[in-house]
Image (spheres, rainbow, N blue to C red):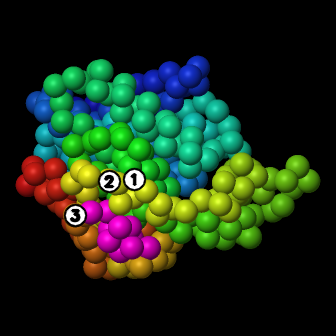
Amino acid sequence: MPTPNVVFDDQGVPLTGSIDVPDTGIGRDVLLLMHGFTGHRMELAYFFVDLGRRLAARGVTVYRFDFRGCGESGGRFVDISVADQIRQIEALMHWLRERHPEARLHLAGFSMGGLAAAHATARGAAPATLTLIAPAGNLKDVVQRNCDAGVALADGTVDLLALPIGPTLRDELANLDTYAGLARIDVPTLVIQGSADAAVPLAVGRRIAQTIPGARWHEVPDADHIFGRIAARDALARAMLARMSLE
């Protein structure tokens, strides 16, 4: 089925999304899937397009949104923060509940989006299941590496591939405990990561899984950060479906 787009009004700022709908139509299971730092709703090498279609083929309706300042959404990249991405996820979850009141609503996030999804759940977003794909508990280090690789500008931002990394995010991360509060999560959770992930150390993913009560840790052999092999994406989709009790 063709992938339609949808726009969510987030306090006057449009968030642009795409919907992967099963051939049988929207059914019982609906998933909100959120991208990582410097990413978008397609992700590198069409990671999210591939994942959305794989899940839709098994009956899951997948909503993929660009965060504010990312992809085709409104807002400015320079203003992004973990706190605001958490708020956006909460708003999108509320909207999806109103849009699909009979559905089981699932939440998944990748890298920075995984970190935001975890904290949105800890604050009460209450999905039926939570999937954290290579969650960036080391986001402070990731942003610092990107700043070191970019070009410092006179206004205090760093030019990284024409994306301005601003002081809002850097100041937030200087004081953010990325693990705090995760022990409050009380929904079935999957933390999944590739063994060859060069962006997020495996120890970070394992620690997040150990912090969340009852979370399943799943390590995919030889997979990189974006699960950039067909076999790795097969394994990711199967693990997500199993946690949703659909396989």
Which quadrant of the view contains residue 70?
top right
**Residue type beneath disc 2:** Ile
Indicate left or right for 89 with 4 as reference.
right
Q: Secondary structure at mark 1?
A: helix
The secondary structure that most of the magenta stretch takes on is: helix
Report the residue marked by disc 1: 118
Asked if residue 208 is positioned above or below residue 167 in the image, the reply reads below
Quadrant that contains the C terminus: bottom left
Assess whether mark 1 and mark 3 are in contact (beta carbons under 8 angstroms): no
Residue 185, which numbered label?
Answer: 2
Q: Quarter holding the N terminus?
A: top left
Q: Earlier in the sequence, mark 3 or mark 2?
A: 2
What residue sits right under mark 3 in the picture? Answer: 214
Q: Residues within 10 Å of mark 1 (few under 14, many from 20)?
A: many
* Position of residue 13 measured from the top left corner of the image (x, y, whole percent): 58, 25
Which residue range is magenta in the image?
Answer: 204-213
Locate residue 220: give its quadrant. bottom left
Q: In the image, is 52 to the left or to the right of 36?
A: left
Labelled pair 1, 2 in contact (Cβ < 8 Å)? yes
Query: Around disc 3, counting alpha carbons within 10 Å, would you say few (fewer than 14), some (14 to 19), or many (20 or more)?
Result: some
Q: In this orientation, does residue 49 appear?
A: no
Q: Residue at the spot x=32%, y=53% of the render? A: 185
Q: Is residue 208 magenta?
A: yes
Among the 4 quarters of the image, the one containing residue 27 = top left
Q: Nearer the viewer, residue 197 or 118?
A: 118
Q: Give the CA separation, mark 3 to mark 1.
A: 14 Å
Callout in the foreground (1, 2): 2
| Few, some or many residues within 10 Å of mark 2 (<14, 14–19, 20+) | many
Does the stretch in magenta take in 215?
A: no
- Of 48 and 85, which appears nearest the observer? 85
Residue 78 % position (x, y): 71, 45
